[in-house]
Image (cartoon, rainbow, N blue to C red):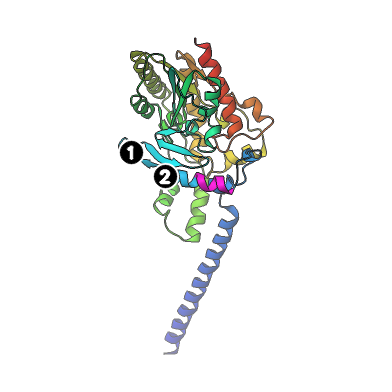
Amino acid sequence: MLPRRRRAQRRIVFAAMLALAIVVIEIGARIWLLLNTPEPIYTYRQHAAAYRDSTYFGAAFRAEQMAWGASQHFDESGLTVSTFHGQYFNHDGRIRRTVGQPAHASHTLYMIGTSTTLNGEVPDEYTIASYLQTQLTDYKVVNLGTSGTNARQQIVILKEQPLTTGDLVVFYGGIGDASGNLPRYPTFPQRICESLQNVQVGIIEAVCTLAGNAAVGTPSIDADQIANNYRARLQEAANWCARHGALFFTFLQPVLSSESLQSDEERYVWSNPKITPIEVRLTLPLGWPVLQTVTRQFPNGYDLTHILDAERHHYDIYLDFDHTTERGNQIVAAAIADHVAGAF
């Protein structure tokens, strides 16, 4: 009986030591996570260097920005719309308010693009569309930016507009057609972690954080397919505008990867996977040159990839891999206005 009792006691001691070890490892994992988990983009933007000189930036702006974001929802086309009216953000359906629109204008300039056209990082008066309005006073500039879109979806928005002879249409963006068309090859550990993403266990979260920081795999692209798709969509948009007497322009936006990173802030933004996803870091440099080639060859196509490079040597402009504050928006608007005016 004694040996059996001793074996039982040993099993109890072993189980207790194992439980204690698991608790210690779990505590250690949570401490490690606290010290090593990448800062979320929402937290980062509360102290982003690009907002340093923005007089509007503060608690009131952030609160309204969050409320405006929450007001957006998908319509039957799978595109976001919003009805929101505040101090900094005003939105009606697909249209974000452009400040300074003339009461009467002979023609309209429809600015269509993704989140870098919507410009949810700044108040209404500091969007590219509002800056553009100050320079093209003969036109009513309409901001039809919609987050997460590519050229195919932007054509859907284009075909909703009541184009008339003399109107202008500007496509601005490219992110959705570069990184959005590139395949993702997660590693085996990452696939497991994706299935466990809702499990609140520190050990698992720590292991998956390490897996998330590992290489996603070797990306590859079909450059010809991306180029052909992008060219075809731009041509469809141009043809639609021509049939309705409007003139079509396409502008490829600037991106953080346009040149070597210029500051510690830019290096932080690019390296933090919660701000610049790993898939973007791996695939954007591969897909972007394809869009540059197509844009430069397209009639009324303008590549603005490097338009902010000089300014970046003196100021932090980017909030992530492609969104900017008012400083970048103003420079982009001036370039668009110059190219549009030069077409006549």
Q: Amino acid at mark 2?
A: Ser
* Residue 326 image point, x, y percent: 59, 33
In this view, which residue lies farthest toward the left? 76
Which residue matches tag 2? 71
Which quarter of the figure has residue 45?
A: top right
Q: Residue at x 40, y 40 (%)?
A: 82
Q: Secondary structure at mark 2?
A: helix
Magenta range = 59-65
Which residue matches tag 1? 75
Residue 62 included in the magenta stretch of the image: yes
Depth check: give the residue in front, 233 or 155.
155
Depth check: give the residue in front, 85 or 95.
85
Which quarter of the figure has residue 221?
A: top left
Q: Is residue 232 above or below residue 90?
A: above
Q: CA distance from mark 2 to mark 1?
A: 12 Å
Q: Residue at x 36, y 29 (%)?
A: 153
Count of numbered marks: 2
Q: Is residue 113 above or below residue 121?
A: above
